């Protein structure tokens, strides 16, 4: 099983329990990242040097999956499905693109974001919290 990494998990890589899980998957070459997550990570950079370093770290360590027309269409379908339960304002556009990417490439979305759990209820999204809810991350 291969995984698609969400920024919510990436942002907590410095926490020991998260680092243990992600480092194991990285060593086994099981982690991928979608371009929207790369952009979210870049958005958090504090300087041009920080940007270059963090983007290089991510793009050299993992396969970057680009968003295709099929993924964009699937994301919109997911959003429409969420409207039937009144949940369409919970996951943002990036979350929908990530979920669609994971579905399209048959990857398990690795996260710490409850919005993916909602999307999974209306789709075939395979998702997993990087650490279970009952496990403290710090």
Image (cartoon, rainbow, N blue to C red):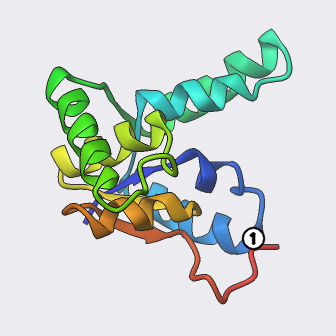
Give the x, y percent position of residue 53.
70, 23
Between 67 and 56, which is closer to the camera in this rendering? 67
Task: Please say whether residue 60 is visible from this viewpoint.
Answer: no
Is residue 15 shown left or right of residue 31? right
Q: Residue at x 20, y 41 (%)?
A: 77
- Local crowd size for mark 1, using a 10 Å CA cut-off: few (<14), some (14–19), many (≥20): few
Say above or below: 94 vs 120: above
Give the x, y percent position of residue 34.
39, 35
**Callout 1: SS:** helix
Q: Residue at x 25, y 66 (%)?
A: 1
Give the x, y percent position of residue 59.
49, 29
Say above or below: 78 vs 21: above
Residue 49 in which image quadrant:
top right
| Residue, disc 1 | 16
Is residue 131 shown left or right of residue 27? right
Is residue 46 shown left or right of residue 115? right
Give the x, y percent position of residue 94.
47, 35
Say above or below: 29 vs 112: above
Q: Residue at x 75, y 82 (%)?
A: 136
**Tag count:** 1
Between 74 and 128, which is closer to the camera in this rendering? 74
Is residue 68 shown left or right of residue 8? left
Residue placed farthest to the bottom in the image? Answer: 134
Between 122 and 109, which is closer to the camera in this rendering? 122
Q: Quadrant of the C terminus?
A: bottom right
Task: Please say whether residue 70 is visible from this viewpoint.
Answer: yes
Q: Residue at x 69, y 23 (%)?
A: 43
Residue placed farthest to the top in the image? Answer: 48
């Amino acid at each position: 099983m291969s995984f698609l990494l969400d920024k919510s998990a990436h942002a907590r890589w410095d926490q020991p329990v998260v680092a243990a899980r992600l480092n194991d998957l990285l060593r086994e070459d099981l982690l991928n990242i979608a371009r929207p997550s790369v952009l979210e990570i870049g958005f958090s950079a504090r300087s041009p040097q920080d940007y270059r370093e963090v983007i290089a770290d991510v793009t050299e360590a993992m396969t970057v999956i680009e968003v295709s027309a099929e993924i964009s269409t699937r994301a919109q379908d997911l959003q429409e499905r969420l409207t039937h339960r009144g949940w369409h304002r919970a996951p943002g556009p990036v979350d929908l693109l990530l979920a669609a990417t994971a579905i399209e490439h048959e990857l398990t979305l690795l996260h710490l974001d409850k919005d993916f759990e909602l999307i999974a209820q209306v789709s075939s999204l395979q998702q997993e919290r990087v650490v279970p809810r009952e496990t403290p991350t710090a």
